[in-house]
């Protein structure tokens, strides 16, 4: 059973634009929501993460927006750059397990 | 701190052969995880260790799969009697016990022919 649904599957954005990737979860016990960035041939790298006690977290050009009532969270990449071209995964975890449930990924391409 | 190291990076094996992968976590991390990632999908949890104890195993980890972490340092993942469906990227990650954030290695890509 897929517990974290991610969309879109792929995304093309012009340089300088805003990239938005969305995720929805089912299990209300989840309490940690990270985003990972993965380049071809590499393992995923932690980008930014949020807990449900805040509605937004910003780190540089990357922002997570979190809607607890809707059980949704999204990643916004401001001023997108060609170097941001990668696959992005959302994930969810619940306290005590440290096991992540990953979304299916979004392949982002930023055009120069 | 050289990150999480996995060896080999690539492995091609014939169906029915056994393969073993190694993971060296970040030295101070006492939790170690194995995930499997197939093409176009997110990583799927296989198992994790706290120190040398294997605390959880996914039902994805069939009897042909075994993982060990002797002395709570490096870990090995063995697949016996490989099948074509085992072809995937096998990712290792580590973390501190009190932290949620993982550090992943670059993975071992297994191709079963």
Image (cartoon, coloured by chain):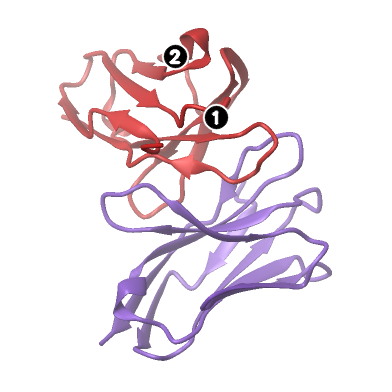
Q: Earlier in the sequence, mark 2 or mark 1?
A: 1
The correct choice, above or below, for A1 with respect to B9 in the image is below
Q: Is residue A55 left or right of residue A15?
A: right
Query: To which quarter of the image does residue B17 belong?
Result: top left
Q: Is residue A49 left or right of residue B92?
A: right
- Give the drawing colour for chain B: red
- Quadrant containing the C terminus of chain B in the rendered view: top left
Q: Position of residue A37 (x, y in %)?
A: 43, 60
Furthest residue in direction front, as rendered: B1
Q: Is residue A29 left or right of residue B102?
A: right
- The residue carrying pointer 2 sits among few (fewer than 14), some (14 to 19) or many (20 or more) residues within 10 Å by Cα, namely some
Q: Position of residue A69 (x, y in %)?
A: 84, 69
For the question of whether residue B59 can be seen, the reply is: no
Q: Is residue B94 left or right of residue B13?
A: right
Residue indicated by mark 1:
B29
The residue at 52%/14% (across/down) is B72
Between B26 and B107, the one lying in front of the other is B26
The correct choice, above or below, for B75 with respect to B101 in the image is above
Badge number at residue B50: none
The residue at 46%/50% (across/down) is B42
Query: To which quarter of the image does residue A86 belong?
Result: bottom left
Residue indicated by mark 2:
B66
Q: Position of residue B26 (x, y in %)?
A: 46, 32
Query: To which quarter of the image does residue A68 belong?
Result: bottom right
Give the secondary structure at mark 2.
Answer: strand
Judging from the image, mark 1 belongs to the subunit labelled B
- Quadrant containing the N terminus of chain B in the rendered view: top left
Colour-to-chain, purple: A
The residue at 65%/43% (across/down) is B100
The residue at 32%/13% (across/down) is B80
Judging from the image, mark 2 belongs to the subunit labelled B
């Amino acid at each position: 059973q897929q517990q974290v649904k991610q969309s879109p599957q792929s995304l093309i954005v012009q340089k300088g634009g805003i990239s938005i990737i969305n995720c929805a979860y089912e299990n209300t016990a989840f309490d940690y929501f990270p985003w990972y960035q993965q380049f071809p041939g590499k393992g995923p790298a932690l980008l930014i993460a949020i807990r449900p006690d805040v509605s937004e977290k910003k780190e540089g050009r990357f922002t997570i927006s979190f809607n607890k009532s809707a059980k949704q969270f999204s990643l916004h990449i401001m001023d997108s750059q060609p170097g941001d071209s990668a696959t992005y995964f959302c994930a969810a975890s619940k306290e005590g397990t440290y096991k992540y449930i990953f979304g299916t990924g979004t392949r982002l391409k930023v055009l120069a | 701190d050289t990150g999480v190291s996995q060896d080999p990076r690539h492995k091609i094996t014939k169906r029915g052969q056994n393969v073993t992968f190694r993971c060296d976590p970040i030295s101070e991390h006492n939790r170690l995880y194995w995930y499997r990632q197939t093409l176009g999908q997110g990583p799927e949890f296989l198992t994790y260790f706290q120190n040398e104890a294997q605390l959880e195993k996914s039902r994805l980890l069939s009897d042909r799969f075994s993982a060990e972490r002797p002395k709570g340092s490096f870990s090995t993942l063995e697949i016996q009697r490989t099948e074509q469906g085992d072809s995937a990227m096998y990712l290792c990650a580590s973390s501190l016990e009190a932290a949620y954030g993982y550090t992943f290695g670059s993975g071992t890509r297994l191709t079963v022919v």
